[in-house]
Amino acid sequence: MDFTKTKTDLGQLIGDKKVIQKNDGTMDEALFNSYGTDRTKVYPPNYQVLVFPESTEDVAAIITYAYKNEIAVVPSGGRTGYAGGAVAKNGEIVVSLSKMNQVVDFDPFLGTLHVQAGMITKNLHKEAEERGFYFPVDFAATGSSQIGGNIATNAGGVRVVHYGLIRDWVLGLTVVNGKGEVYRFNGEILKNNTGYDLKHLFIGSEGTLGIITEAVVKLTKPPKDIRVIFLAVPEYKNILEIFRETHNFDLPLLAFEFLTDYCLDKVKEHLGVPDPFQEPSKYYVLMEFEVSGETDEEKLYSILESITEKELITDGTIAQNSRQNETFWKYREGISESLSLAYTVHKNDISLPLRNMEAFLDEMTTLLTSKYQGFHIALFGHIGDGNLHLNIVKPKDLSDVEFFTQCKKVDPEMFTLIQKFKGSISAEHGIGLLKKDYLNFSRSESEIDTMRAIKLAFDPRGILNPGKVL
């Protein structure tokens, strides 16, 4: 491909300043490369042309050009994913949505915010709060992830147990398909029973059906007050008992997270936070509740008293203010960053029915200790909605290539166990490049064939994020 010609052609379509070619003197090479990858370290980026559209019309012009010239395209958001979904490894055009970060509209009656897809998630939270509303989808990467990428991966995060997935908060989308055609799925009304709701096909599609350029998201009222309980738990089975115990109290549970002692140690090393308790424990649990008065405060202490009397914990404390809330959350939300920045990690993001969780972990522990001898296993996740993050940390004396080769040998056995216990091989990170060979563990052949047919309908030349998912 003549990349110089591609740059010139695209510059004529959307403006020269919006198009960058590798090593043209416009951008540092390391920064340029970063737009063509995500947090995985398996596939290095390999591409030459980077574009920064500022509108849906710009994106449509880019994709129309790519369609006519049969050039592959990779959408680039905050690049916070862990499945290789944003990697450009075969000379694709990379389309960064980072300059599409504006509020388009706000409806105070319906309670919706219409934004461009490149808006940082944390900024969307701020825009909602300034208008007296609340956007409840939240996770560790909100400071760098973009709302379009969140929707493209159907992000979940830490409050799914109460608020649900991002799919539940999307009313409307603007999308450009693989031919450069623009779809505008109405987000200004709640009721729209006019046939197939096509927008849901694009939520979780990882940019393989179209590039999301705008979104209309529902907002809700902010929680009255948030309080966090942090617990030291001696055995995994106790975690599920604690979760069951929360159902005995009429108090809104916003989040229910857990982590192992290994994870906590890495967060302490990376962030310099203190030990939460005098004595270490094998597991830790973080629970977040909404409280609205003295009666609810009493219920918090009743929960802590109940699980203590039943000997489900060895220690526990309730945050006394918002600052302590933030400190407790650092123990959980700092895990991914602490592992990814300091180590090479093979990530598995899985989900299981809670009733099968303990049996699965028993068999999984046996498998991992036999297959990953000498490896460290970092286990944490959103246990309240059945989502486990199972991370294998590379030993220092092992090369990246050898490490990932060993992990790939074990993955099918792990996924067989997940299938046995009626789970999913990907809870929220998606399929991307890393899990597409294992899609059959969660989807039947008939389902996969139907997905291929849908892909062909929206992207007939297969130029959108090729090699991902299918």
Image (cartoon, rainbow, N blue to C red):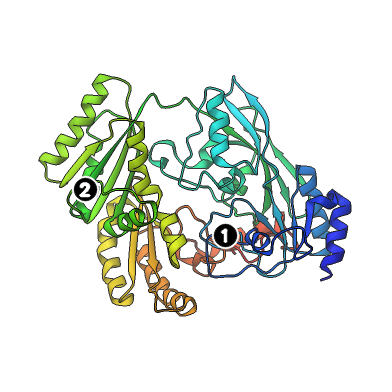
Which amino acid type is marked by label 1?
Asp
Q: Where is residue 75 in the image (x, y as percent from the top left)?
A: 67, 55
Q: Earlier in the sequence, mark 1 or mark 2?
A: 1
Disc 2 on helix, strand or loop? Answer: strand
Compared to residue 31, the image places residue 151 above or below, namely above
Q: Is residue 48 left or right of residue 42?
A: right
State if disc 2 and disc 1 touch (CB < 8 Å).
no
Viewport quadrant of the N terminus: bottom right
Q: Kindly tell me whether residue 70 is visible in this rendering.
A: yes
The residue that label 1 is drawn on is 38
Residue situated in front as seen by the camera: 105 or 29? 29
Q: Where is residue 84 in the image (x, y as percent from the top left)?
A: 56, 63
Q: How crowded is mark 1: few (under 14 residues within 10 Å), some or many (20 or more)?
A: many
Where, by quadrant of the figure, is residue 418 drawn? bottom left
The residue that label 2 is drawn on is 232
Compared to residue 28, the image places residue 58 above or below, namely above
Q: How far apart are marks 1 and 2 (CA)?
A: 33 Å
Viewport quadrant of the C terminus: bottom right
